[in-house]
Image (cartoon, coloured by chain):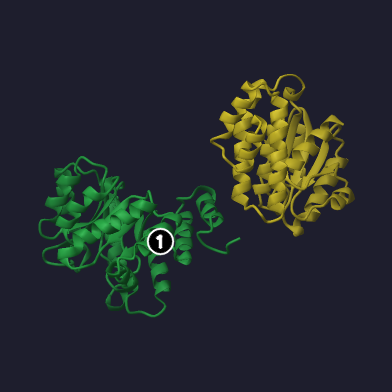
Chain colours: A green, B yellow
Amino acid sequence: MILIGEKINGAIPSVAKAIAAKDADYIRNLAKVQTEAGVDYLDVCASVDNDVELETMKWLIDLVQEVSDVPISIDSPNAHIIAEAIKYCNKPGLINSVSMEGDKIDLIFPLIADTKWECVALLNDDTGIPQDAEKRLEVFATIMDKAKQYNIVPKRLHIDPLVQMLCTSEDGILAIMDVMREIKKQYPQIHITGGASNISFNLPVRRLVNQAFIVMAMSAGMDSAIIDPTKEDLMGMIFATEALLGQDEYCMEYIGAYREGKFGVKK
Amino acid sequence: MSKIAEVKAMVEAGKAKLVPGLVQEALDAGNAAGDILEGMIESMGVVGDKFSSGELFVPEMLMAAKAMSKGVEVLKPHLTGDSAKSLGTCVIGTVAGDLHDIGKNLVAMMLESVGFTIVDLGVDVSAEKFVNAAKDNANVKLVACSGLLTTTMPAMKETVNLLKSSGLSGVKVIVGGAPVSQEMADMIGADGFAADAGGAAVKAKELVSA
C-alpha cells in the first residue's frame, strides 16, 4: 500500500491557524510524525487564497524538506501553482492532482513526461463528477489517451475514482468498486488511490466507516491512499487487509509494522 | 562481531536473503562448516525459546528456519568428514487425528539441516503407516512423531507402542508438540523428547549416535 500522509493541509483548522501564524515548528512536527509513521509521500496543501498560495506552498515544502526525506505530494486545485511548486521539490514526488477539467492535464503531463514524478488523476471533467460507473470509465479512457500521448506509463498514475459521501449514496461504493476492478483489469500496473475519510462525512463514529471502506476498496484494487498515518487502527487495518489479500508473505509486514509500534499495544 | 555471530544474528532475525552470503563469508574467514552449523542450531534454540515465551510469532520462527536452511545449502558441500556423513533416514509425521504441520515441518527442516534424510509422511498419519515407512525406507534410524492436540496424545502413545513392538531394530523414536513433555515421552516409551525444533536437532543427533 502506498501511503500519502494527509496531515499538512490548510483545510484542517489547526493547520490553517499554523499557516496564518507562520508557526514553522508546527508544520515541521507534522512532517516528522508522518515520516516516522512510514508514509511514502507527504501531502502538502496550502488551502489559502490564490494570491498567496504559491508562496505558502514554498514555505510549507521548504519546512517539510528540512526535516524529512520523504517525497512531497503537491496538493492544489490549481495546476499552475503545481507547475511552479515542482521546482521547490528536492526530488520527484507526486502531483495531487489532475483531471479532465480544463487544461490541467495538458499543462502538467508535458512537465512530468520525462521525469520520475507520479501523478494523481481524478475521474472528473468539465461537466463535474460523473454519476455512474460507465461515465467515470469514459473519463478514465480519455485520461489514458493523454497519458499515452505524453508517454506517461500507467504505473506512474494514481487514479482517484472520486468516492462520494456514503450518507447520500444510493449504492454505497458498489459502483466505485466496479470502476476500480475494471481499471485494474485494463492496466494491472496502475495505482488506484483516494481519500479514506471523505466517505464518512456527516456520519457518527466516522473511523468505523473509514476502516470498512479501506478494506473494501483495497479488495477491489485500491493500492494507494491519502490517510492520517498516525491513526493506529486505520494503519493496522491496512496492514491486516494486505495480509488477507495475500500481499504479505507470512504476515511479516504486518508483524514488522506491529513491532515498529505502528499499531496495537506498544511495548 | 565474528562472522559466526553475524550468521547467528541473521538466522534469529529470519533474514533468508542475507544468511547464505554471511555463511560464505564465515567459511572464507576460515571457520569450520561444523561450527557454523552448530551456531545456527543454537540460534534456532534461541528462536524456539522466544516462541515458547510468546515473544515471537509463528511466521517469524518459520522465517528463521527458512534462513537457516538457506545457510545450510551453502554449507552442505563443505560438511566433509564426520558432520557430512548422513545420520540416516528420519521418518516424520503428525499423528493420527491431528492436522497440524507447522511444528512438524520446522523439525523436519532442522533435522535435514543436521544431516538426516527426511521421509515426511505429512499429517494424520496412522501408527501402521509410521511402522510401514520405517520398514520400507532404507537406513531408517529415527521416527519423529508430532502432535499439537491434547486429544491426539493417545494416538501418539499407540504409534510409539506399535513402533516398539513391531520388531524394528536400531530405530529410535522421538516425540514432540505442545502438549508433550519429557514425562509424557517417558511414560509412553519414546526414546527422546524435545521442546522445540532446535532442541529436536540436538536430541536427534544424540539418539542416533548413542
* Residue drawn at x 33%, y 63% as measured from the top left: A8
- Label 1 sits on a secondary structure element that is helix
Q: Is residue B118 visible?
A: no
Q: Amino acid at mark 1?
A: Asn
Query: What residue do we see at 16% from left, 50% from top?
Result: A108
Left or right: B69 with respect to A58?
A: right
Q: Chain of mark 1?
A: A
Q: Is residue B20 visible?
A: yes
* Residue A29: image location, x then y, percent: 40, 61
Q: Position of residue A19 (x, y in %)?
A: 29, 67
- Image position, residue A257 (x, y; %): 51, 55
Looking at the image, which residue is at 10% across and 59% down?
Answer: A102
Of A222 and A185, nearer the camera is A222
Q: Give whichever of A132, A64 is nearer the camera.
A: A64
Q: Quadrant of residue B117?
A: top right
In the image, residue A5 sits, relative to residue B2, either above or below, namely: below
Look at mark 1 in the image and give the residue it sits on. Answer: A29
Vertical comparison of B115 with A75: above or below: above
Q: Quadrant of the C terminus of chain A?
A: bottom right
**Crowd rating for badge 1 (residues with CA inside 10 Å; few <14, some 14–19, many 20+):** some
Question: Where A11 falls versus A156 (above or below)?
Answer: below
Seen in the picture, residue B71 relative to B155 is either above or below; the reply is: above
Query: Residue at coordinates 82% horizontally, 52% vertically from top-left?
Result: B181
Q: Residue furthest top?
A: B81
Q: How many marks?
A: 1
> Based on the displayed image, in which of its 4 quarters is residue A148 positioned?
top left
A91 left or right of A259 in image: left
Q: Would residue A170 be found to the left or right of residue A252 on screen?
A: left
Q: Nearer the viewer, residue A170 or A201?
A: A201
Query: Quadrant of residue B35 in the image?
Result: top right
